[in-house]
Image: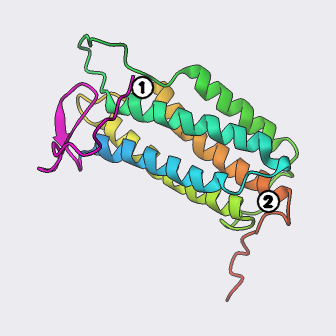
Amino acid sequence: MVVLNKIYTKTGDAGTTALGTGIRVAKYDVRIEAYGTVDETNAVLGLVRLHTTTAELVDLDAMLARVQNDLFDLGADLCTPDTGEKLEYEPLRITAEQVTRLENEIDELNGPLEPLRSFVLPAGAPAAAFLHQARTVSRRAERLMVELSARDGEVVSGPALHYINRLSDFLFVASRFVNHLGDGDVLWVPGGNR
């Protein structure tokens, strides 16, 4: 259980932070960058949800609430490196079931949408525009997670990598779903301003 009685601890004043294992690393460590960017994605989803309070978006809002919770799970997963050593507790890890749920929700949202015949611009309804922002931040988190997993001695689980990859797909389809309920996607016109 998390208990936060005092918000500042001064333990990070020298530029380090503690992982879930207690090991201290530099605040610029790629693992910190990865789960910090997952947190940033979550914050953007909070902005999205300011615009998903209507009755027609209630199901999407519930999906986004689940994703926000999953992103805390993902942050906890990344914060506790799998070193192969026995810990005093069972670390929280992303599961294949969370990935499957996200895939099912992608399919549900994609169902009423017409196939794309052009790239879409990150625009449209406010919720759609913020979903695109969340998508690009989640892609940055994915790049950092892949970089971390490529480093010697670092492990990022398959389900965690699958989840972050599916998340950007989910956010893209969700943005299209929101725009579908309004004026539609804003399409890219190649060379349209020449």
Magenta segment, prevailing SS (helix, strand or loop): loop
Q: Position of residue 153 (x, y in %)?
A: 23, 28
Mark before the other along the chain sequence, 2 or 1: 1
Residue tagged 1: 157
- Which residues lie in the magenta part? 1-28
Residue type at tag 1: Ser
Does the segment drawn in magenta span residue 184?
no
Which quadrant would residue 62 be assigned to in this image? Answer: top right
Q: Is residue 1 rendered to the left or right of residue 41? A: left
The label on residue 17 is: none
Residue 179 versus residue 68 in the image, above or below: below
**Identity of the residue furthest to the bottom in this view:** 194
| Closer to us: 53 or 136 | 53
Element type at mark 1 = loop
- Residue at point 76%, 68% (across, down): 186
Disc 2 to disc 1, how far (Cα)? 34 Å
| Closer to us: 48 or 172 | 48
| Closer to us: 1 or 82 | 1
Element type at mark 2 = helix
CB contact under 8 Å: marks 2 and 1: no
Instruction: Say whether residue 135 is visible.
Output: no
- Residue at point 71%, 44% (across, down): 61
Quadrant containing the C terminus is bottom right
- Residue at point 62%, 34% (across, down): 66
Q: Position of residue 64 (x, y in %)?
A: 65, 42
Q: Position of residue 117 (x, y in %)?
A: 80, 60
Residue 175 versus residue 69 in the image, above or below: below
Front disc: 2 or 1: 2
Q: Is residue 34 rendered to the left or right of residue 115? A: left
Residue tagged 2: 179
